[in-house]
């Protein structure tokens, strides 16, 4: 503990040096800009500044790029809340209640709670990262395909809590999403599934074009006549800040979201997108007023946003403690480290304490910078909503096109977004909730791969799922939650029947 | 007659929607069986999971259609994010948005970013929203060329150029 | 007077021809179009050589990443680019691999090797075999013996079906006459994690990826698949030394379109030759743990053909897995 504090002091010395601080702030600013644009995410931002980072000393380079990553996380929630367009994949859940709050003229509180939640989660998870990186990394390594499958099956159960509609429709949408996730090259057999010869579909439809289309484009199509659906154009100035009630209701979700997000984030794989979905489901389950979810419940913003940021920090644990990249962003960061002659690996923490602690310290600072940056910007962003809707929506459409196109420089992505927009419009007119589609879409390729990988490991023997302690535990917990979850609806049904009989 | 009975119209639409979903499921069943190996129980192939999901989709789509117990049109569970009986003006607008996006997607690589966005904005501001032509032109030019400058020169993200380098 | 005029005309023509000949290539910025995302070895190699080439050629050298479909999208874009020498690429096994995979699936190939002209080989690092330290094999021979005793029981991880880490192990299996179970993962990172967590026993990895882990005791190297030992792992024998003909490299080379005129290719070859010896390039490559192995086009072409044949044969031998 004392060692950690000492290391942290060294780290702060490094991170607060003006030259390093400047780059931290620069990274946060660019990250926010990049994150606010729908589609464009941290990967794009980091790729942009990559050449510049090569000319900087290693700690400064990492601080800059990590700042972009964080900034993009913060910025992504801004578009989700203001115009219901996910800035990046992990912000999809924030669209649900965040935009509802905007429609009620409460965009300011929504943005502020998102920023505060992100800050708290980011800071707390950095502490956990700092103190527990090596043991956490070892825990994360214990997750192989069977454990991963168990975790994802639990994630599948979350689907029923995301949507507010009737169960059959929720299941239909979830299954549609799961099915759409099957499009692309099957990594276990090499077959290109349902791609119809279109090479751009080999990697799948892409969660970003799908989400931007299903949420954002469909929103624009629906909001035309329905005045009530548009964001409130005259937000009440006095209520730019969250009320006492808002803060009180957000405390629990922020705390729980941090824990959930961090734990999910350290596990290898892009499961970190799941963190916001799981947090939303947990908050809805624990809330006194679950019917408010989907209609502007502040918990629906506080929890997922915190989980998001905690997962982002958690994802750095394997990178720093083991030198293993779990996603494209970490791969770039590791490459940057290598270019600067720092060998990532289990010995990084001990051999390069300055780098490690400097990085940790800059994460604290980055979180603080982003909070300071975003809170005043709330007023600015909300002013953007004052534009007459007839000017606003063409601009939003342009942002969607640009954001989605520039991810892969591919017009196929824009076409996917358009198709998703049309489908989203029709589905929502028919009273289907499209949120489960996105979650299903993300889950199915991972589920299938984990399942088939487990069988590949065991040579086809299904007993592998019962032979591994962590997997068995997770499956048991999942089964328990599922059964417990079934009790209330069955009970209510029984109650209704007996009431009807009376 | 159904104009006076929105309920009937709704049921008709719901049926159409469910049909579309069933058709989607059927399409995936067909493609799975036709082109992909099923594999075996201890080595499931690329067709296994898509087939199972497609069948489930058909089942759930039919379930969500049938019966009052599925909560069809139950006002307590209605997602108020749609306009059940939007007039045709709303549909027309929706179609215009999709058509514009399609055109933009195809045009981007052909006539370049600036011209595409310029035309897109002019279309909406000038034609659809009937803003004064000068305002529409000014805003469209400013936004298309301005955003291009932001992306290409500040953020260094390449955007497609059209003929003559525009 | 007429003589003067014709004399002037001849002079002008000659001057014109001379001016043409001196129309230097390149006269505008050049693009290195990559099929791989930032962070991988191809990308770092490109970023290591780009500034050096820029200095030598006197024109900006821009790197563009166009990832997608396992390098297919970007590679196809390079093949279809105008053959004027202004679009080159840093490429690796994918040039032979993707058409071979297309062939076994009965698909028309998205591109073929003969659409590309090699300029120079830049690096070639042998794959290294790593096992989890809890596994009982201390030498490569022990692994082979155990594999022979229980065929199909040992699990090896790879970064993807038909990827270089998969083919490397298949080559080893063929050379030793053994069978093992394959665990495909979603990439180099997940494959490494799988072995670090002992969910799979064995992995063929790039020395810069597995080396730091080995030095920290998280992995045990058993053998390398090169002609010579790896500098960063001097105690690890080559499979050749141990008597097995199993050689496979993770390499990167400069390529352009086959239709590019020979004089322009000559310019590139010269620039590459200078860049490959430049201390800035060598230092940048050393820092990311990549070796450098320069071969000019004439030596590179037969090497590339041999490596491609090995790749194609191995892919065909693996065939469809389901």
Image (cartoon, coloured by chain):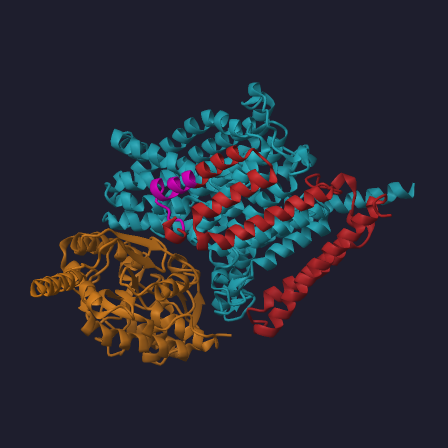
Left or right: A326, with C306 as reference point: right
Count all numbered tags in the image, as a single digit.
0
Tell me where residue C131 appears, x and y as whole percent.
Answer: 34, 64
Question: Farthest top residue?
Answer: A238
Q: Closest to the observer: C243 or A448?
A: A448
Specify whether residue C84 is in view. Answer: yes
Magenta stretch secondary structure, dominant: helix
Q: Which span of residues is magenta-colored? A: B145-160
x 65%, y 63%: residue: B54
**Left or right relative to B108: residue A249:** right
Q: Which chain wears red?
A: B
Q: Residue at x 30, y 31 (%)?
A: A21
Q: Colour of chain C?
A: orange
Foreground residue among B159 and B164: B164
Q: Position of residue C169 (x, y in %)?
A: 35, 71
Chain identity for the colour cyan used in the image? A
Q: Is B155 left, or right, of B30 in this rendering?
A: left
The image quarter containing residue A12 is: top left
- Is residue A468 visible to the viewer in this orientation of the structure? no
Q: Nearer the viewer, residue C66 or B92?
A: B92
Q: Quadrant of residue A391?
A: top right
Most distant residue in the right direction: A502
Confirm whether the magenta stretch covers residue B157: yes
């Amino acid at each position: 503990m004392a060692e950690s504090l000492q290391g942290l002091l060294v780290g702060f010395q490094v991170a607060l040096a003006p030259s390093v601080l400047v780059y931290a702030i620069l990274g946060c600013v660019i990250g926010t800009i990049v994150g606010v644009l729908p589609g464009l995410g941290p990967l794009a931002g980091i790729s942009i500044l990559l050449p510049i980072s090569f000319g900087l000393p290693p700690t400064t380079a990492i601080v800059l790029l990590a700042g972009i990553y964080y900034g993009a996380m913060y910025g992504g929630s801004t578009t989700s809340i203001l115009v219901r367009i996910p800035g990046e994949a992990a912000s999809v859940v924030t669209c649900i209640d965040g935009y509802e709050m905007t429609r009620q003229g409460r965009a300011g509180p929504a943005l502020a709670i998102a920023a505060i939640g992100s800050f708290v989660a980011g800071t707390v998870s950095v502490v956990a990262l700092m103190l527990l990186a090596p043991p956490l990394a070892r825990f994360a390594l214990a997750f192989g395909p069977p454990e991963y499958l168990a975790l994802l099956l639990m994630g599948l159960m979350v689907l029923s809590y995301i949507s507010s509609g009737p169960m059959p429709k929720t299941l239909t949408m979830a299954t549609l999403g799961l099915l759409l996730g099957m499009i692309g090259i099957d990594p276990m057999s090499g077959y290109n599934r349902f791609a119809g010869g279109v090479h751009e579909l080999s990697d799948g439809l892409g969660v970003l074009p799908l989400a931007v289309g299903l949420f954002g484009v469909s929103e624009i199509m629906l909001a035309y006549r329905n005045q009530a659906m548009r964001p409130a154009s005259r937000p009440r100035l006095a209520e730019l800040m969250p009320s006492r009630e808002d803060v009180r209701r957000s405390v629990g979700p922020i705390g729980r979201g941090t824990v959930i997000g961090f734990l999910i984030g350290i596990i290898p794989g892009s499961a970190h997108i799941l963190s916001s979905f799981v947090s939303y489901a947990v908050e809805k389950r624990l809330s006194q007023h679950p019917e408010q979810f989907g209609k502007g419940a502040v918990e629906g913003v506080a929890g997922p946003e915190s989980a998001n940021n905690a997962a982002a920090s958690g994802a750095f644990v394997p990178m720093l403690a083991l030198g293993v990249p779990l996603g494209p962003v970490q791969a770039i960061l590791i490459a940057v480290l290598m270019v600067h002659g720092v060998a990532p690996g289990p010995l990084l923490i001990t051999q390069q304490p300055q780098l490690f602690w400097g990085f940790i310290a800059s994460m604290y600072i980055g979180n603080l910078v982003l909070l300071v940056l975003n809170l005043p910007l709330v007023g600015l962003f909300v002013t953007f909503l004052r534009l007459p809707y007839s000017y606003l929506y063409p601009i939003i459409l342009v942002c969607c096109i640009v954001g989605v196109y520039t991810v892969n420089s591919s017009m196929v992505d824009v076409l996917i977004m358009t198709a998703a927009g049309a489908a989203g419009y029709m589905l929502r007119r028919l009273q289907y909730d499209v949120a489960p589609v996105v979650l299903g879409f993300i889950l199915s390729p991972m589920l299938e791969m984990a399942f088939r990988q487990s069988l590949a490991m065991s040579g086809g023997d299904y007993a592998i799922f019962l032979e591994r302690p962590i997997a068995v535990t997770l499956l048991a917990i999942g089964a328990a939650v599922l059964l417990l979850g079934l009790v209330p609806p069955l009970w209510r049904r029984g109650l209704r029947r007996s009431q009807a009989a009376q | 007659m159904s104009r006076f009975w929105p309920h009937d119209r709704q049921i008709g639409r719901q049926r159409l929607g469910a049909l579309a979903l069933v058709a989607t499921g059927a399409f995936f069943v067909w493609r799975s069986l036709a082109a992909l190996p099923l594999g075996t129980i201890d080595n499931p192939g690329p067709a296994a999971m898509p087939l199972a999901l497609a069948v489930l989709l058909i089942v759930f789509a039919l379930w969500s259609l049938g019966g009052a117990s599925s909560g069809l049109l139950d006002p307590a569970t209605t997602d108020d994010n749609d306009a059940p009986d939007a007039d045709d003006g709303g549909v027309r607008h929706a179609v215009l948005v999709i058509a514009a996006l399609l055109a933009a997607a195809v045009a981007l690589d052909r006539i370049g970013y600036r011209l595409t966005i310029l035309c897109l904005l002019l279309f909406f501001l000038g034609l659809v929203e009937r803003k004064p032509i000068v305002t529409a032109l000014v805003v469209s030019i400013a936004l298309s060329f301005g955003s291009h400058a932001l992306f290409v020169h500040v953020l260094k993200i390449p955007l497609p150029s059209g003929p003559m380098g525009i | 007077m007429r003589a003067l005029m014709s004399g002037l005309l001849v002079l002008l023509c000659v001057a014109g021809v001379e001016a043409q000949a001196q129309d230097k290539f390149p006269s505008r910025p050049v693009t290195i179009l990559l099929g791989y995302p930032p962070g991988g070895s191809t990308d770092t190699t490109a970023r290591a050589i780009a500034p050096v080439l820029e200095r030598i050629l006197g024109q900006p050298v821009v790197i563009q990443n166009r990832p997608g479909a396992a390098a297919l999208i970007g590679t196809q874009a390079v093949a279809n680019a105008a053959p004027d020498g202004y679009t080159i690429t840093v490429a690796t096994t994918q040039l032979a691999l993707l058409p071979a995979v297309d062939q076994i699936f009965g698909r028309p190939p998205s591109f073929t090797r003969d659409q590309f002209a090699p300029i120079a080989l830049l690096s070639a690092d042998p794959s290294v075999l790593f096992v989890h330290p809890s596994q009982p094999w201390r030498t490569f021979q022990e692994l082979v013996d155990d594999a022979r005793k229980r065929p199909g029981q040992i699990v090896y991880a790879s970064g993807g079906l038909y990827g270089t880490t998969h083919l490397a192990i298949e080559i080893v299996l063929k050379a030793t006459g053994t069978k093992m179970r394959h665990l495909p993962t979603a990439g180099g990172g997940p494959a490494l994690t799988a072995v670090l967590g002992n969910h799979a026993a064995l992995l063929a990895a790039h020395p810069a990826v597995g080396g730091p882990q080995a030095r920290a005791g998280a992995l045990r190297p058993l053998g390398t698949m090169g002609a010579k030992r790896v500098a960063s792992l001097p105690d690890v024998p080559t499979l050749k030394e141990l008597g097995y003909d199993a050689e496979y490299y993770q390499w990167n080379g400069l390529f352009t379109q086959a239709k590019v005129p020979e004089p322009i290719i000559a310019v590139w070859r010269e620039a590459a030759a200078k860049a490959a010896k430049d201390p800035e390039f060598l230092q940048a490559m050393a820092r990311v743990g990549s070796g450098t192995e320069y071969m000019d086009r004439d030596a590179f072409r037969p090497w590339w053909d041999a490596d491609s044949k090995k790749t194609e044969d191995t892919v065909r031998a693996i065939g469809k897995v389901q």
